[in-house]
Amino acid sequence: MSGVDQVRRRAGVDGEGSLYRRTRLGPDGKPYLRWVAQISLGGRDDRRIVRRICPTKSDAKAALAELLRPVEPVPPQREQPLGAYLRRWLDETAAPSLSPSTLRGYRDALAHLEPIADIPIGQLQPEDIERALAAMTTRRAHAKRQKPAAPKTVRNVQIFLRRALGQAEQRGHITRNVAKMVPLRRVPRHHVEALTPERAKEILSAVKGDATRPPMPSRSVACVPRRSSGSPGPTSTRRGPSRPSGTSSRGQGRGPLASSSRPRPPRNRCRSPRS
């Protein structure tokens, strides 16, 4: 017996596959039988052979049926539901380049677009987006009555949808960005009028002349001099009869004080050692 002995049992045309047995000699010189399931893929220029080697004929038949099973084609990007596309775009494409606060805002926008999440992105219409925007609420869980969403929130959802579908348009998944066909929601601005110098002076004059306003302490009263070592302490605030000027604080019968009103310098208690 030769080293390789193949007997073809069934051969079909391209795409139908074939099933045959193959006999080989083992290391001990004894022949062993194997069954081969085989199909041919591709055309003449790019032909590719796919084989499955099985120990029994029944296993080879099951392998051939598995090879001939039609492969479900991957749906094109334009057939993806809007919700699935937005989640994939946010997690895989946009998340690395977004700040944490922007990423949280975009995830909140996904919840507002749930009413149109099942529509394929290739079939999405501007009217669908307008319907979802009109149904947006504050989404408070414990509120008895949901209020319409703020214009700023609606505008953020529109910007998120425009950006995601704009990238799908750039990659050729869709032919147009329908989110740009819906006008952005107008956000009212609150203008703050700055005070003019004349108006500021009027307010300060009115506050200063208000009789009901308690008087502000003057700087001389509010600021207390810092007490340093050797200097006399602050004037005592105890209530009592005032002393006449020129009398000593230790007794009034000892005569007037010295003509110099400056305080006596403190005595230096630190003496230098004698040489």
Image: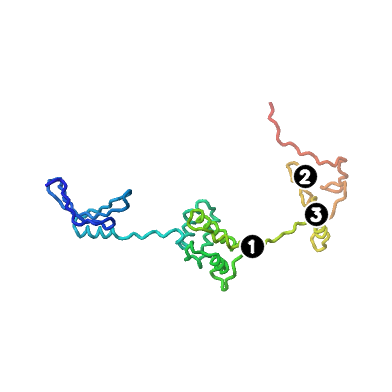
Tell me the residue at 29%/57% (across/down): 15
State how far apart marks 1 and 2 are (Cα).
71 Å
Which of the two discs, 2 and 3, sits closer to the camera?
Answer: 3
- Residue 38: give x, y in percent of width and height: 25, 54
Across and down, in percent, residue 238 comes to 78, 54
Say which of 92 and 123 sits in front: 123
Q: CA distance from mark 2 to mark 3?
A: 47 Å
Instruction: Name the residue rendered at 66%, 62% in the picture.
Output: 188
Q: Where does label 3 land, which residue?
A: 197
Q: Is residue 96 left or right of residue 269?
A: left
**Mark 1 vs mark 2: in front:** 1
Q: Amino acid at mark 1?
A: Arg
Return the residue nearer the eye: 260 or 136: 136
Quadrant in the picture for residue 148 = bottom right
Judging depth in this view, the residue of 66 and 115 nearest the camera is 66
Label 1 vs 2, first from the N-terminus:
1
Residue 186, numbered label: 1
Q: Label 2 belongs to which residue?
A: 232
Q: Amino acid at mark 3?
A: Pro
Q: Earlier in the sequence, mark 3 or mark 1?
A: 1
State which mark lies toward you, 3 or 1.
1
x, y percent for residue 229: 73, 42
Is 98 left, or right, of 40 in this rendering?
right
In the image, is residue 42 above or below residue 183?
Answer: above
Q: Amino acid at mark 2?
A: Pro
